Image (cartoon, rainbow, N blue to C red):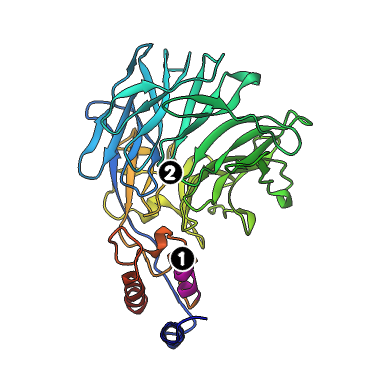
């Protein structure tokens, strides 16, 4: 039985939020933006971001880079033995460990999975026995990386550590092989794409949790007539984002998937007809690209889809709607986004930092209502990022009173 004082506090809070009304809308997010590039280099992209938002990684020209708020963008060395002069950094964790692919050409020839440690030192990740090619696409805070080995029709999803590499031998329920693993979170949930043995035109999105004997098919947006999906991202609390389509590409739409709600389409922006999601965080915010004639960087906050350019308040030199290669590829739990757009006409990676995050909106539905209190309780019990209401980087009972203050002040 709950302690009487705890019960009194619970009903006091419910009375407090009820007195505030049934709910109020949260103002739209606002962002600052800065380039992710090395001076003198003309082409860059932001590719991966750590869960906390402390680190961002990507590529400038053919060089891997890593960004921090205090240190800015710095070059990472290429793999010299065996020589791979072209580097594609794909993801980074909260320790600053970056993973990606080293290649012999700009087009990705002879790829090898590589890792840069927190100091920036680079090394090849071990390949499974008998394999000579591989790629790393995601890494979690434990330093476990995921990606694929081999290529073409023989490509197979793989896991890499500093000590070993192994293929994911599990299959889909229909017997399809796991082709590529794109992301892994701290709980070890791996997401990616798999082959469909019954239809070569179909790609199945999957997740695989530790100990699972087979992967789980996350389905597709069947209400749109879709039969294919790719899972590109997984949040710290297990949400999945990616692209659903017909026959692995036609009529592509972005989605967010949860254990409780399954797959839900992210609403398209007016004037766009297709899209795909590439990042999702623990608040259910999703980022990616929507397209018509051009590529438009979008943010979905669980309630509304925005063109990210319309949320930038600090710089008019960015164009995130007019280019054909714009995109967002990652979002952190603090709302920081990375991707690429046009900066003074040049294709340039970016780091967009949220400056008015409404932390009291714990369930991320764009409203302040009594349900945010029960969502905070759940976040506290499960040590989720949304619990941290005072911004000290931890989840403690002091965040309870901080949530009350944040709710009373409107965010």
Q: Counting other residues with Cα less than 10 Å from the Cα at mark 2, is it few (<14), some (14-19), or many (20 or more)?
A: many
Instruction: Tell me the quarter of the picture where residue 359 sits.
Output: bottom left
39 in magenta = no
Q: Would residue 321 be visible to someone looking at this image?
A: no
Q: Earlier in the sequence, mark 1 or mark 2?
A: 2
Image quarter (top left, top right, bottom left or bottom right) of the C terminus:
bottom left
Q: Secondary structure at mark 2?
A: strand
Give x and y (percent) for residue 300. 49, 55
Give x and y (percent) for residue 170. 66, 33
Give x and y (percent) for residue 258. 59, 54
Q: Would residue 363 be visible to someone looking at this image?
A: yes
Query: Does 76 sit above or below residue 246?
Result: above
Dominant secondary structure of the magenta stretch? helix
Write the residue at 39% across / 64% down: 387
Q: Which residue is mark 2?
A: 330
Q: Secondary structure at mark 1?
A: helix
Q: Counting other residues with Cα less than 10 Å from the Cα at mark 1, is it few (<14), some (14-19), or many (20 or more)?
A: few
Q: Which residue is mark 1?
A: 381
Query: Does 117 sit above or below residue 23?
Result: above
Q: Bounds of the magenta span?
A: 371-379
Write the residue at 41% across / 86% down: 5
Write the residue at 68% across / 43% down: 217
Tell me how far mark 1 sits from mark 2, CA to CA. Answer: 27 Å
Give x and y (percent) for residue 260. 62, 59
């Amino acid at each position: 039985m709950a302690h009487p004082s705890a019960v009194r506090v619970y009903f006091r809070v419910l009375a407090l939020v009820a007195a505030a009304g049934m709910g109020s809308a949260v103002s739209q997010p606002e962002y600052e933006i800065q380039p992710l590039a090395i001076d003198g280099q003309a082409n860059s992209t932001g590719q991966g971001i750590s869960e906390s938002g402390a680190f961002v990684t990507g590529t400038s020209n053919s060089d891997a880079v890593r960004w921090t708020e205090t240190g800015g963008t710095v070059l990472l060395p290429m793999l010299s033995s065996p020589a791979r002069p072209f580097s594609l950094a794909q993801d980074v964790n909260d320790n600053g460990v970056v993973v990606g692919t080293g290649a012999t050409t700009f087009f990705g020839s002879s790829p090898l999975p590589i890792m840069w440690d927190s100091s920036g030192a680079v090394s090849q990740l071990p390949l499974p026995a008998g394999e000579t090619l591989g790629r790393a696409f995601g890494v979690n805070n434990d330093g476990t990386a995921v990606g694929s080995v081999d290529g073409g029709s023989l490509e197979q999803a793989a896991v890499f550590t500093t000590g070993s590499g192994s293929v994911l031998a599990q299959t889909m329920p229909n017997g399809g092989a796991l082709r590529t693993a794109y992301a892994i979170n701290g709980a070890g949930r791996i997401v990616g794409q798999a082959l469909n043995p019954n239809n070569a035109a179909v790609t199945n999105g999957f997740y695989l949790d530790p100990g699972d004997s087979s992967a789980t098919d996350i389905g597709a947006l069947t209400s749109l007539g879709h039969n294919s999906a790719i899972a590109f991202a997984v949040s710290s609390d297990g949400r999945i984002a990616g692209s659903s389509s017909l026959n692995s590409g036609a009529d592509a739409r972005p989605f967010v998937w949860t254990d409780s709600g399954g797959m839900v389409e992210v609403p398209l922006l007016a004037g766009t007809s297709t899209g795909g999601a590439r990042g999702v965080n623990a608040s259910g915010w999703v980022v990616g690209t929507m397209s018509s004639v051009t590529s438009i960087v979008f943010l979905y906050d669980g309630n509304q889809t925005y063109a990210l350019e319309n949320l930038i308040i600090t710089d008019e030199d960015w164009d995130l709607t007019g280019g054909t290669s714009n995109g967002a590829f990652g979002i952190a739990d603090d709302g920081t986004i990375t991707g690429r757009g046009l900066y003074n006409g040049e294709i340039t990676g970016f780091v967009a930092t949220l400056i008015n995050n409404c932390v009291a909106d714990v369930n991320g539905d764009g409203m302040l209502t009594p349900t945010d209190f029960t969502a905070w309780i759940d976040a506290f019990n499960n040590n989720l990022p949304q619990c941290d209401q005072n911004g000290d980087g931890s989840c403690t009972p002091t965040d309870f009173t901080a949530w009350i203050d944040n709710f009373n002040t409107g965010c």
